[in-house]
Amino acid sequence: MNYVTGAIGVLCLIIVAVFAIQNLGAVEVTFIVWTASVSKIVLILGTYFLGMLTGWGLIELVKRLL
């Protein structure tokens, strides 16, 4: 079963990578008073990996509580 989960994870990563590569243009990101111009690929992959880390941390927290 771990192989299935790993395969699904790798498939999702490939899909996100293909999407990011197709969107190479720059985008302006604003957060409160901070503004930066970054590549879409950096923004997409950064958001994806932060989401993965957050999800992993939440799962680990729930496992410890149970």
Image: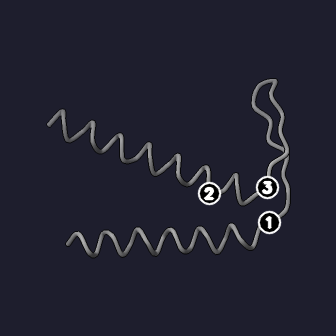
Look at the picture and state if 59 lies above or below 17.
Answer: above
Q: Residues within 10 Å of mark 1 (few under 14, many from 20)?
A: few
Q: Secondary structure at mark 2?
A: helix
**Distance of mark 2 from mark 3, alpha carbons?**
10 Å
Please tell me in which quadrant of the rendered image residue 16 appears.
bottom right
Q: Amino acid at mark 3?
A: Ser
Q: Amino acid at mark 1?
A: Leu
Q: Residues within 10 Å of mark 3 (few under 14, many from 20)?
A: some
Q: Which residue is mark 1?
A: 24
Q: Secondary structure at mark 3?
A: strand
Tell me which label, 3 or 1, sits earlier in the chain: 1
Q: Quadrant of the N terminus?
A: bottom left
**Distance of mark 1 from mark 2, alpha carbons?**
12 Å
Q: Which residue is mark 2?
A: 45
Percent from the top left, x then y, of residue 36? 83, 39
Percent from the top left, x then y, of residue 65? 18, 33
Q: Secondary structure at mark 1?
A: loop
Percent from the top left, x then y, of residue 6? 33, 70
Q: Which residue is mark 3?
A: 39
**Distance of mark 3 from mark 1, alpha carbons?**
6 Å
